[in-house]
Image (cartoon, coloured by chain):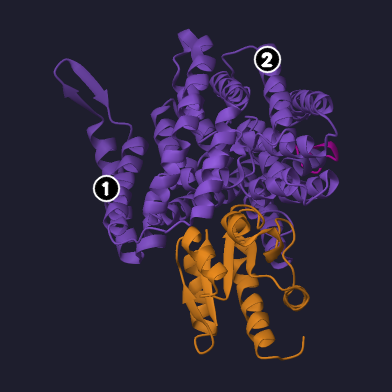
Amino acid sequence: MKIECCGLTSTQTKQIIDKEFADKVETLVDPDMVAARKVKAGEVDYYLGSCMTGGGGSLATAIMVLGYGNCLVVSKQGKCPSDKEVRHMVYNGNHKAFGYVKTHTEQIVPALVRALTDKAEGKPE
Amino acid sequence: MVTEFAFPQLLRTIVLVAISAWASLLSHKCISNFNDGARPVFPELMEGRMTRPEFAVVVTGMGVGWVMAGFNQWLGTGLIACHLILIATDCIGAWSPNQYVALGLGAAYGLLCAYGTQAIAAVFNGLPYNFLNDLTNITTPVLPIFCMYPAIAIAGQFGAKKGIISAVITAIVYIVCTIVGSVKIGAISVALYPYTFAMLAGMVCLVVYAVGASKNSEAIETTEEEENLFTKNAQRIKSNWVYLCVQGALNALGIKILAQAYQPIILASAITSGDMNIFYLAMIGVIFAFIPLIVSTALATGVYQAVGLTAVMLGGAMVPDSVWFLAPVVGFAIEFIEIQLLGLLGTALSKFPELTKCGDHIRDAMISCTTLALTIGAFMAGNAIWGAVGLMTVGGFYTINEVTGQRIPKSAIGPLAAVAVGLLYNLAILLHLVTLG
């Protein structure tokens, strides 16, 4: 599985994924315009982005390239979902791009990537 | 905290109301909005894929946190932030069924902000112990920490080693400036404002590294379909130039007379330190950091940013006091030039996609620095108001918020806790638990 790490905490996101999912996920840190196009072309599976509010700059480019319906706001300011809630969101949708608040990076990224890899392997929710 | 204003309250209120009403109208007409993240949702409404209520719900959902952040910035600085006004007007415009309602509600909201903040300040002033002065501590660490932002951005993008080198250079420049004080060139003495020059040194490092990196970057190949879309959208923005230039004029006047503030935390620190250069310099960084995000979302949607490329804020602020009434002219002109340059900037960005990444890292660094500064400042304010009890309270608020999923944004919790300390201290005075020395 290939994941593009974008947005304000792209470096931190990459570090978390590389540390915990080294055997399953390949990470890239392209500029968001490049990253979103790669996802659209099918070269990369998912787009992760962070910003101040979760739904703002994190997904702006992704929404513009991939379309609104393919993007999901995972965490908003004032509401950082639990691991279980993140998993539920991933299993109940078919999104390509995920946005979260930059200060939630540590909580969201592991749960999100775990859900994405488990779903790809066909594990139940 | 800014408490002395050079321009009368009435004038500032009128301008604020005008800004608020106009921004609501433009958001309603899908001409411009402030929240860069909400901009890509506008075509969903414009092209009929969403109904207005559906659209408004999404825009509001994205905006709530920001309005709160704007209020929080007012608490620490005494300045009415763009975020308090313009994010709300995005939502007001989105909900309004027609343009008259948008104008009316926008104006009402402007009034509410102007008088609401005054009323809260009046309540604080009437308390037995007025802690507004102590709250000034909130912005004390801002300049020292913020002038490190280029080094932080470098560390994020180019690794720790280059980041540390830049941080050390920044610190050395600061120290040298404080020792030397001023240089004489001929008969003119140039004061070396330490923070300004330290930040400038960091920004020079950033440019050097970024230029080096952009040489290796690959251009994005845009498809013909995208090209056509961009051209069509640039055309739409250009056709709305009268609306947008009026908005630019209002914004420039607004920041000149401090009816509203952009980057209020830096602006307030610059005003209180008496060195506006640091604000101008910071704004150059801000403009650079926001251009990729604003240009790309504007060209993808045909909706422009309510403060343009933020250059009107720099231009407006730089107008000398004696000719303040020229600020709208400056704002109008800057906005007009920006709109003409949009297409060109878009082309430049697809040639150097690395620049967008630079922008992300700079914005992240700026946010990290101000969040840290506000948190530390809140502890200092808590300490100034009520010593150990203050520290305990702010610390408690902060960590409880952390472990329970950050229900209050990280940058807001500290200052809110400091205000809580002030209120609790007054309560303690009323209950005779503490006596004023």
| Residue lying farthest to the left in this orientation | B186
Which chain is orange in the picture? A
User: Which span is picked out in magenta?
Assistant: B429-437
Establish whether labels 2 and 1 are both on one chain: yes
What amino acid is labelled 2 in the image? Answer: Gln
Q: Dot 1, crowdedness within 10 Å: few (<14), some or many (≥20)? A: some
Q: Dot 2, crowdedness within 10 Å: few (<14), some or many (≥20)? A: some
Which chain is purple in the picture? B
**Quick one: SS at disc 2?**
helix
Residue at the image position 68 percent from the left and 41 percent from the top: B72
Residue at the image position 58 percent from the left and 73 percent from the top: A46
- Residue B141 image point, x, y percent: 49, 44
Residue in the foreground of this view, choosing between B87 and A104: B87
Queried whether the magenta region covers residue B435, the answer comes back as yes
Q: Which of marks 2 and 1 is nearer the N terminus?
A: 2
Picture layout, residue B220 above or below residue B45: below
Give the residue at mark 1: B172
Residue at the image position 58 percent from the left and 59 percent from the top: A65
Q: Quadrant of residue B103?
A: top right
Picture layout, residue A31 above or below residue B178: below
**Quick one: SS at disc 1?**
helix
Q: Do the residues labelled 2 and 1 touch (CB within 8 Å)?
A: no
- Residue B357 image point, x, y percent: 44, 57
Residue in the foreground of this view, choosing between B314 and B145: B314
Residue at the image position 52 percent from the left and 42 percent from the top: B231
For the N terminus of chain B, give its image quadrant: top right
Q: Which label was assigned to residue B336?
A: none
Queried whether the magenta region covers residue B266, the answer comes back as no
The CA span between labels 2 and 1 is: 42 Å
Q: Does the rendering let one see residue B241? A: yes
Give the residue at mark 2: B9
